[in-house]
Amino acid sequence: MRVIQLLPTISMGDAVSNDALAIAKVLRDMGYQTGIYAENIDNRLPAGTAKPVSKMPRLQTEDVVLYHMSTGSALNEMIPKLRCKKGMIYHNITPSYFFQPYNAKLTQLLKDGLTGVLNLVGAFDFCLADSEFNKQALLEMGYTCPIAVRPVLIPFSDYAKKPTQEIIDRYDNDGYVNFIFVGRIAPNKKQEDVIRAFSCYQRFCNPKSRLILVGSWSGAESYYRRLCRYTAALQAENVLFTGHIPFPDILAYYHVADLFLCMSEHEGFCVPLVEAMYFGVPILAYRACAVPDTLGDSGILLDKKDPVEAAMVADRILTDTSLRRELVARQRRRQQDFSYGAVRALLESQLREFLK
C-alpha cells in the first residue's frame, strides 16, 4: 500500500506544509511507501521534498490519498476521479469576504476552495480535522464519513534551536513591554484590532511599550499599507512589522515577548498559540473559530472587540505576577496536549484505523 499526500501548495514555513512534512515522517516510520505531491512547490525547500502532481504515480485501488484541503485548486476536481481510498485533512477555508477589498485573485481562490469542499461531500472515505471547530464545519456541510480530530503535528524540537541573538540583544531587557502577534499579515487575522488594543495600552497604561507583528504581507500588500496608515493615525509608537523573516528570528521574537495578543476572526487551529505556550508567553485572545479549541482552559479569552477592555486586561496580566504565573502554568499544561509524542500517537492510531 502506498499513502500519497496531495496538496495545492507546499511552501517554506507554512503551517499546512509543515503538517504535511511531519505526517510524511510518521508514515515512513510506520513502514508505508509515501510521497508528497503538489501543484506549486516552493523552490526554497530542499530538493526532493515534494514532486509535481504530474509526476504522481498511477494509483491502484489499494493505495490511499491524503488530501490537504485549505484553498481552491484544480485538485478539487481531480479527487473524485481517483479510484483508490481517499482521506481529507481539513485545515478549513478562510472566508473570501475578508480578502475582497484587498486581493481579487485570492478572494476567488478562497471562494473556489469553499465550493470545492461542498462539491466533495461524499468523495472521501474518512476525514481528519485539525480542530473540533473544523470537524463541526464539515458536519454542517453534510459530510457523513468518519471524521476524527487530530491537532496539527508540531515538532517542538525545532523551537529549541538557537534564536537570533542580535534581536534578543536589541529588544530584551530594555525596559519596554513587548506585545507580539505571529501570523501572516492578512485581513482575517485582524492586525488592526491588535494595533488598536495596543494603542490603548500604550496611551493609558504604559507608554514604554512595543508591538511586534511577525509575518509576511505577501499577497496582502494593500492591507499592510492600510495597517501602516492606521498605526500612524492612532499615533501608536514602536509598532514593528517584521515582514518575512528567517525561523531563528521568529524564535528570538518569542524570547523577548511579554504578551501574545491575538484578535484573529478566523483560525482553523492557530499554531502560534501553541508556540506561545511553549515559550511561556501569556496569551490574550479574542474568542473566535478554533481559538477556544486550541487554548482549552489556558490563556484569557475576550468575548468582544473592545480595545480599552483588551488593554486593561493586558495590563492586569503584565502587572499581576501571580496571575501571570498561573496563566503560564496553565498554558504549559495545555501545551503538553500538543506534544509531538501525544499527537503522533493519536495520528498513528487514527491512520491504522482508517488505512486498514
Image (cartoon, rainbow, N blue to C red):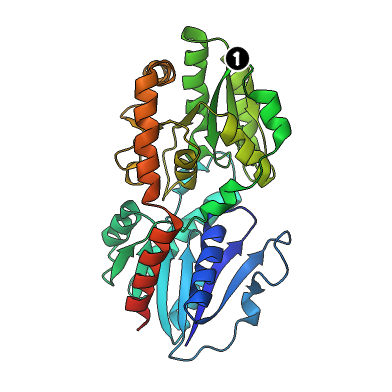
| Residue 18 in view, yes or no | yes
Relative height, residue 208 to residue 70 (above, below) = above
Residue denoted by label 1: 175
Tell me what residue is drawn at x 60 percent, y 70 percent. Answer: 38
Measured as percent of width and height from the top left, residue 145 is found at: 28, 72
Q: Quadrant of residue 277?
A: top left
Measured as percent of width and height from the top left, residue 93 is found at: 44, 54
Q: Residue 296 or 289: which is nearer the viewer?
A: 296
Q: Residue 29 or 149: which is nearer the viewer?
A: 29
Q: Quadrant of the C terminus?
A: bottom left
Measured as percent of width and height from the top left, residue 310 is found at: 39, 21
Q: Residue 178 or 82: which is nearer the viewer?
A: 178
Three-letter residue code for mark 1: Gly
Relative height, residue 331 to residue 158 (above, below) = above
Relative horizontal placement of residue 55, taking residue 137 as reference (left or right): right
Relative height, residue 334 to residue 281 (above, below) = below
Q: Residue 210 or 251: which is nearer the viewer?
A: 251
Relative horizontal placement of residue 96, taking residue 336 as reference (left or right): right
Local secondary structure at mark 1? loop
Tell me what residue is drawn at x 65 percent, y 24 percent. Answer: 171
Label 1 crowding class (10 Å Cα cut-off): few <14, some 14-19, many 20+?
Answer: few
Tell me what residue is drawn at x 64 percent, y 46 percent. Answer: 219
Measured as percent of width and height from the top left, residue 255 is found at: 58, 33
Q: Report the number of discs.
A: 1
Relative horizontal placement of residue 271, taking residue 151 as reference (left or right): right
| Residue 73 in view, yes or no | no
Tell me what residue is drawn at x 69 percent, y 61 percent. Answer: 42
